[in-house]
Image (cartoon, grey):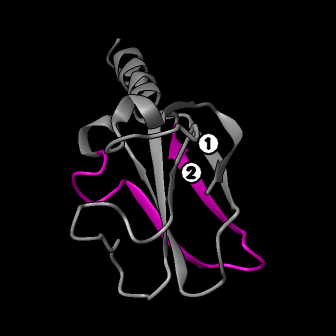
Amino acid sequence: MKTVLICVMLALGKIVIAQETATITIEVENISNDNGHLIVGMYTEDNFLKSKPEYSQQVKIKDGKATIVFNDVPVGEYGVSSFHDANDNQQMDFEPTGMPKEDYGLSNNPMLYGPPNWNDAKFQLLKGENKITIRY
């Protein structure tokens, strides 16, 4: 009986620990020039544009385009933010009025008339291969 109980507990433990993962390819298009780098962050609702993203990468731009791949990401709801760090200072630059100096984009490509919010960018990451395109 103890052996059966231990086997059941181990099996249940594997079910709880095993989490479905996905791969997401993010393509960014229409970047104004190839200067600097593109910085991309993938966030959950809890940290969206407030703190360090769950996943991030910095990549070179070629011919106004860049591609980022995140592997083994747990399935769930995420939002992606990217910006063109043209001067390579590792931060987004703003005008004194608060308007961004550097190009940026979000998943879902919303038309924004104010600061981005979670509902503008959220999407469901599904098991397997996923792809989104962000247009500047």
Residue at 36 percent across and 64 percent down: it is 100
Q: Of helix, strand and loop, which one carries label 2?
A: strand
In the rendered image, which residue does mark 1 sit on?
Answer: 22
For the C terminus, give its image quadrant: bottom right
In the rendered image, which residue does mark 2 sit on?
Answer: 72
Quick check: is 49 in the magenta stretch? yes
* Horizontal arrangement in the rendering, residue 63 relative to residue 134 (left or right): right
The spot of residue 73 in percent (x, y) is 52, 47
* Horizontal arrangement in the rendering, residue 57 relative to residue 33 (left or right): left
The residue type indicated by label 2 comes to: Asp
What residue occupies the far right of the structure in this picture?
63
The residue type indicated by label 1 comes to: Ala
Residue at 52 percent across and 53 percent down: it is 105
The spot of residue 12 in percent (x, y) is 41, 22
Q: CA distance from mark 2 to mark 1?
A: 5 Å
What residue occupies the far front of the structure in this picture?
97
Assess disc 2: are there few (<14), some (14-19) or many (≥20) residues with their C-alpha within 10 Å of its C-alpha: few
The spot of residue 89 in percent (x, y) is 36, 87
Find the magenta span and give its range.
48-74
Q: Of helix, strand and loop, which one carries label 1?
A: strand
Q: Is residue 113 above or below residue 87?
A: above
Quick check: is 90 in the magenta stretch? no
Quarter where residue 118 is shown: top left
Q: Is residue 5 above or below residue 81?
A: above
The spot of residue 14 in percent (x, y) is 45, 31
Q: Earlier in the sequence, mark 2 or mark 1?
A: 1
Q: Is residue 35 above or below residue 6?
A: below
Residue at 39 percent across and 40 percent down: it is 113
